[in-house]
C-alpha cells in the first residue's frame, strides 16, 4: 500500500529535497507552502505519484485547520508528517534585534509546528500508526552570538518532540527530531532579508550540508521498521564543530 507524506515548507531547501526524495521512493505527497508557483512546479514534476498541494501559511491557525480538514480522501491518511516549515531572521544581538523578526520566528517555528501537528495527530492516533519528523537545529542545543530567538525556537522543537513521545506512548506513533548544522540553502538568504552576498559569505571556504543530505536522513529515519524510533539525530558537516568557551577579559 502506498504511504503518504505531508511536508510543510515544501517549496525550497530541506522541504523541497524531502519532497523529491519521497516522490522518488513512490510515496504519495501532500505539499504545503506559501509560494503557489513553486507548488505548481512540484505538482507538474512529480507525475508518477499522487500529489496534493495547498498554499498555506502555517502561522495562520485557521488556514492550517482548513488545510487538514479539506484534504482529499486519497490523501487523508497521513503516514508521515515532516514539520519542515521554519526560518531564521537576523543575526543581531538580543539588545538590538528586531522584535518583528523574533515574533515571526516564534509564529513559524513554534506555533506553526504546533498547529500542523495538532491538526494531524488525531487521525494518526485513530489509525494506530504514523510518524512525525520535526526539523530542529543544532542551534537548539548549541548557542552562538545572534542566535537568540532562533536557537530558543529550536530548543522548543527538541522538547516538544520529546514530550510528544511521552504523550504518544502506547499509540504506535513515532516522533523524531532531526537537527542539522551548517547547510546551504535559501536559509541564509532569508535570514539576511534577501542579501545574497552576505548569505554567500556564510558558506565561503566550507563544504556545508546540502538539502539532499538532510532528505536522505529524513527518509532513512522514516524507513526504519515500525518498532524502531530514532528520537534525535544531530548532524553537522565535517567543517563544523565547537569553539572554546568565550571569556571576556577586561583591559
Image (cartoon, grey):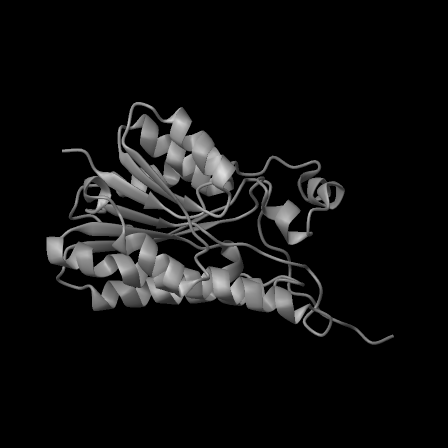
Q: Position of residue 12 (x, y in %)?
A: 51, 40
Q: Residue furthest top?
A: 48
Residue name at image x 68 percent, y 68 percent: 98
Based on the displayed image, in which of its 4 quarters is residue 198 positioned? top right
Locate residue 2, reporting x and y percent.
18, 33
**Quarter of the image with the N terminus in it:** top left
| Of the pair 44 and 226, the residue shown nearer to us | 44
**Closer to the camera in the image, 238 or 221:** 221
Residue 159: name its quadrant.
bottom left
> Is residue 158 visible to the viewer in this orientation of the structure?
no
The residue depicted at 51 percent of the width and 40 percent of the height is 13
Q: Name the spot of residue 80 as percent of width and height, x first.
A: 27, 46
**Quadrant holding the C terminus:** bottom right
Q: Position of 69 compared to 193: left or right?
A: left
> Would residue 194 be found to the left or right of residue 173 on screen?
right
Q: Against 204, is 111 above or below?
A: below
Residue 131 appears at what percent x and percent y?
A: 25, 50
The total of numbered circles placed on residues is 0
The image quadrant that residue 207 belongs to is top right
**Residue at 20% in and 39% down:** 74
Amino acid at each position: 500500500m502506498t504511504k503518504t507524506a505531508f511536508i510543510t515548507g515544501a517549496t525550497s531547501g530541506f522541504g523541497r529535497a524531502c519532497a523529491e526524495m519521497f516522490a522518488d521512493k513512490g510515496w504519495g505527497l501532500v505539499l504545503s507552502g506559501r509560494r503557489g508557483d513553486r507548488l505548481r512546479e512540484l505538482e507538474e514534476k512529480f507525475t508518477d505519484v499522487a500529489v496534493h498541494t495547498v498554499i498555506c501559511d502555517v502561522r495562520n491557525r485557521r488556514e492550517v485547520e482548513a488545510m487538514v480538514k479539506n484534504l482529499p480522501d486519497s490523501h487523508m491518511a497521513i503516514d508521515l508528517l515532516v514539520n519542515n516549515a521554519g526560518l531564521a531572521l537576523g543575526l543581531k544581538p538580543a539588545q538590538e534585534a528586531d522584535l518583528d523578526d523574533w515574533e515571526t520566528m516564534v509564529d513559524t517555528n513554534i506555533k506553526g509546528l504546533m498547529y500542523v501537528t495538532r491538526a494531524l495527530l488525531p487521525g494518526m492516533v485513530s489509525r494506530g500508526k504514523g510518524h512525525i519528523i520535526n526539523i530542529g537545529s543544532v542551534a537548539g542545543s548549541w548557542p552562538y552570538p545572534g542566535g537568540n530567538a532562533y536557537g530558543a525556537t529550536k530548543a522548543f522543537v527538541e522538547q516538544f518532540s520529546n514530550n510528544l513521545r511521552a504523550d504518544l506512548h502506547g499509540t504506535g506513533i513515532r516522533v523524531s527530531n532531526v537537527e542539522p548544522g551548517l547547510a546551504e540553502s535559501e536559509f541564509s538568504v532569508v535570514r539576511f532579508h534577501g542579501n545574497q552576498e552576505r548569505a554567500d559569505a556564510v558558506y565561503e571556504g566550507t563544504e556545508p550540508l546540502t538539502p539532499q543530505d538532510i532528505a536522505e536522513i529524513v527518509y532513512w529515519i522514516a524507513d526504519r521498521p515500525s518498532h524502531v524510533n530514532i528520537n534525535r539525530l544531530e548532524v553537522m558537516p565535517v567543517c563544523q564543530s565547537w569553539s572554546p568557551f568565550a571569556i571576556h577579559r577586561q583591559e
